[in-house]
Structure formats: C-alpha cells, structure tokens
Amino acid sequence: MSETRPTTARPDSSGAQFTIGEISHQPEVWREAAANIAAERADVDAFLAPLLARPDLRIVLTGAGTSAFVGGVAAPELSRLLSRRIEAIATTDLVSNPREFLAEDVPTLVISFARSGNSPESVAATRLADECLTDVSHLIVTCDPAGRLNLEHQGREKSYVLLMPADANDQGFAMTSSFTSMLLSVLLVLGGGGPETVAPLVAAAAGIVDGGWDAIADLADDRYDRVVYLGSGPLTALARESALKLLELTAGQVVSYYDSALGFRHGPKSVLDERTLVVVFISSDEYTRKYDLDILAELRDALDPSRVIAIAPDGVTTADGLSVPFEGLTAVNDSFLASVYVVVAQILALSFALGVGTTPDNPFPSGNVNRVVKGVRLHALDEAASGVA
C-alpha cells in the first residue's frame, strides 16, 4: 500500500492523515476490487443475467451526495455498453418524491451506492422502491459490511450485495477511495472486464500519487478563493463531485462550482473573477473533446492561462497553458477515466484545505456537518393521505 504522505507544498498535514492515506492507496484498492469481482463473477452474473435479459428492465443508479455522483458518472457509459436506458437518480430525490421518480411500474433493478449504508436515505430508498413497484431487484454496492444497507439486503432473494475492499471504507470525512472503488466496480460488473481493465488506471493514478502530487498541491495557493470544474457527459458528474470535495474539505472557505463545457457559457460563466481557478476535464472521445478544447481555449484567452488547468489523456493537445496529462489512457472511455481524473481533484481539495487551515479528516469539528448525515426525518408514504403532519 502506498505510504501515507504529506506534500512538500503543504507540509502541515495534521488532521489529514486518513484523507492523505485514502487518496494515496486508491491504486491498490482498485486492484483488489477488480480481483474480488473476478472471483465473484459467476455469482453476480447469475443474479444479473435473468434481469438484463428482460428488454423492459429499467435500471436506476442511486445514492446520496458523492454516492449519487457514482451513478451520474457511470450511467452514460453503462447505457452505451448495454444499449438500454439507465438513469442516475439520487436517493435524496427518490425519498422525497417517490411517486414521481418511481411512477413507472415496470421491472426495475435499483443499484444503490453507499460508503457506510447508514445514511437515512440509503435504506429508505430501497424500501420505497419495494413499496412503489411490483417487480424490483436490488444490487447493493457498499463499503461497510456492518452498515444498515448491507445488513438489510444480505441474503435477500432479490438482492445481491457487492462489498468493496476493506480499505475502500474511508475513515476520513470526505469520500475518496470509496467513490472510485464503487465507480470502477459497477462499470466492471455491468460492463464486463476485470483486473486487466483497471491496470492502466492503476498505473496512471500511481504515477500521480508518487510523482505528481506536489505539482498539483502547488496550484492551491492563496490567489484563489473559488474553483470551477468543467466536464462533458460523464465528466460533468465528475466535475460536480470535484466541486463537492473542495467545498467539504475546506469547510466552505473556498467556493466551488461545476458545469458542463457547453453549459458554462449560458450564465454560469459570470462566476469568473480574478481569484478563480478553472479545471477542465478533457474527454477521451474525439467528438466530445472538441467542445472541451473550445471552452479551454476560450477561458485561457480571457484569463491568465496559468489559471485554467486541463486534465487530459496524454497525447491530447491542449494548447498553451498548464495541463496534467495521463499516459496510456487515450483509448479509455470517460466513465473509467473519471476514476483517475478525480485523484487530481482530491489532491487539490486536500491541499486547499491544508492551506486555509482546516483539518480535512474532520473539517466540521462542531458537528454541524457530519460524515454520515444526521437529522433526516423519514415520512411514511401514507402520511399525506391520512393527514399526518
């Protein structure tokens, strides 16, 4: 496992030991996750094959916060691979509006992502699906064997639980290795592939952890008090996750925003000022990449080019300005590529957090924001009809 390490740019890493270690060990966690899936392949295929054989099957990817963004990144790639509609809907939407999001009573596979499985919405979303739908199955992708989501679905006839490696169960406040391991796992399980599929991703991420960390940390200086992340398709959901990571770890002291490459011009571009850093995730798709490079060039022309960073597969020309290239990934689809790209965003968020003086392992010592969400009151579906407040 990679050594837990501070950066030379931000040597005061007190209160960040978990987060640093969990970012650093992702390559090893991915390798273990892929090996576990290979070992479980016969069982998980036996569960999924009859479901995927149904042309009317609806697949919903769900989770809360970062876990929801796993679905947002994975859904486009899985739709392409399986040639069927796959939707990413957050549990926070399913729980508050089940009659709208579960309106179609068709055979449904709900794929739930959760680090702990103890967030109030995690189990509630699966229960509501069972209540609203006649024919529903569950694939649970989670990191905590002691979590409520695992305990509720383990051994159920129409459920299959896919547990992540133990080291994916992040102990720090923010989800890092839990996010990437669940993302790669669902892509492998539904899209096929195994250890050979993740090998180039492992190598690329290890290169950043071992050799690129300090250069990324150097970007997090006090010139910036806001950061914008942009990406297209699956990388838009990655931009959202990256923005959340920065907001969480800095306890809101550095403001973040996300958008798509095309959407940013339609008003949100107003967020730019002289203290803004922009990160553009460049697609590996030849067609989509044109739009990413267009916004990159436009922003570098309007701003100091040093304030617009391109994260791209090696070999993709991003013109003048700072880029973080990843070797050997030009043929990797964006949903897989996201697992490597996000490592840059994680290091950047951690470095900003250390720079502004938060403790990334627990940025909110007062407890007003929690690692596992608290304070959610769950309501029964029949409350409104019965007039219960």
Image: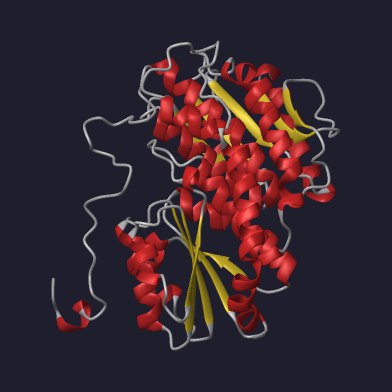
- Quadrant in the picture for the C terminus: bottom left
Using the rendered image of the protein, determine whether residue 260 is visible from the camera's viewpoint: no
The answer to which image quadrant residue 118 occupies is: bottom left
Q: Is residue 218 visible?
A: yes
Image quadrant in which you'd find residue 193:
bottom right
Q: Residue furthest front?
A: 39
- Residue at x 78% of width, y 45% of height: 284
Kindly identify the residue that appears in the image at 62 percent across and 57 percent down: 74
Residue 70 at what x, y percent from top left?
A: 54, 53
Work out whether 214 lies above or below 74.
above
- Locate residue 139, reporting x and y percent: 51, 69
- Give the percent coordinates (x, y) of residue 80: 73, 65
Q: Is residue 118 above or below residue 258?
A: below
Residue drawn at the location 74% of the way across and 44% of the way down: 199
Query: On the rendered structure, is 14 left or right of 40?
Result: left
Residue depicted at 41% across the width and 62% down the height: 91
Residue furthest left as drawn: 388
The residue lying toward the viewer, choosing from 8 and 381, is 8
In front: 190, or 344? 190
Quadrant where the N terminus is found in the figure: top right
Image coordinates for residue 150, horizontal then vertical, percent: 39, 63
